[in-house]
Image (cartoon, rainbow, N blue to C red):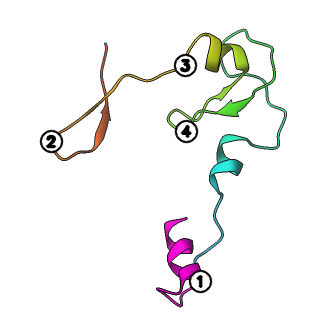
Amino acid sequence: MWKYSWFKSGYTLERPDTFTNVNQTLFPNTMNECDIDECVNFHLLKCSHCRKFLCMQHFFEDYHYHDIESNDDGFVNDVDLM
């Protein structure tokens, strides 16, 4: 998407390859079931961190999150809880 914004604004003349936008990534047009074990609800969205399909219950109500921390470089890393 970054390359496309540079192309669209005229900073570069090279048209980037096809990509999926944020809406297509998080809200796919498929009717998959939730990826949480034994859940039969259809998914609402896909987690951008772990790529799991999640229903309303498991994303919002049960608060789906990931423990992360940033290192000295400013990059975010998963916290190993095991």
Total numbered badges shown on the rendered structure: 4
Q: Earlier in the sequence, mark 1 or mark 3?
A: 1
Which percent across, then down, holds residue 28? 75, 43
Distance CA(mark 1)–CA(mark 3): 37 Å
Query: What amino acid type is highlighted by mark number 2?
Result: Asp
Q: Quarter of the image holding residue 14?
A: bottom right
User: Which numbered disc covers residue 48?
Assistant: 4
Q: Quarter of the image holding residue 79?
A: top left
Query: What amino acid type is highlighted by mark number 3?
Result: His
Q: Which residue is mark 3?
A: 64
Q: Residues within 10 Å of mark 3 (few under 14, many from 20)?
A: few
Q: Looking at the picture, does residue 16 appear above or below residue 72?
A: below
Q: Earlier in the sequence, mark 1 or mark 4?
A: 1
Look at the image and give the residue range highlighted in magenta.
Answer: 1-14
Q: Earlier in the sequence, mark 1 or mark 2?
A: 1
Distance CA(mark 4)–CA(mark 2): 23 Å
Query: What amino acid type is highlighted by mark number 1?
Result: Arg
Q: Secondary structure at mark 4?
A: loop
Residue pictured at 37% horizontal, 22% vertical: 67
Distance CA(mark 3)–CA(mark 2): 26 Å
Q: Earlier in the sequence, mark 4 or mark 2?
A: 4
Q: Please name whichever residue, 6 or 24, is drawn nearer the observer in this view of the structure.
A: 6
Residue pictured at 82% horizontal, 39% vertical: 30
Residue pictured at 15% horizontal, 41% vertical: 72
Query: Viewed as shown, does residue 59 lie left or right of 12?
Result: right
Q: Residues within 10 Å of mark 4 (few under 14, many from 20)?
A: few
Query: What amino acid type is highlighted by mark number 4?
Result: Ser
Q: Residues within 10 Å of mark 2 (few under 14, many from 20)?
A: few
Quarter holding the C terminus is: top left
User: Which numbered disc covers residue 15?
Assistant: 1
Q: Which residue is mark 2?
A: 72
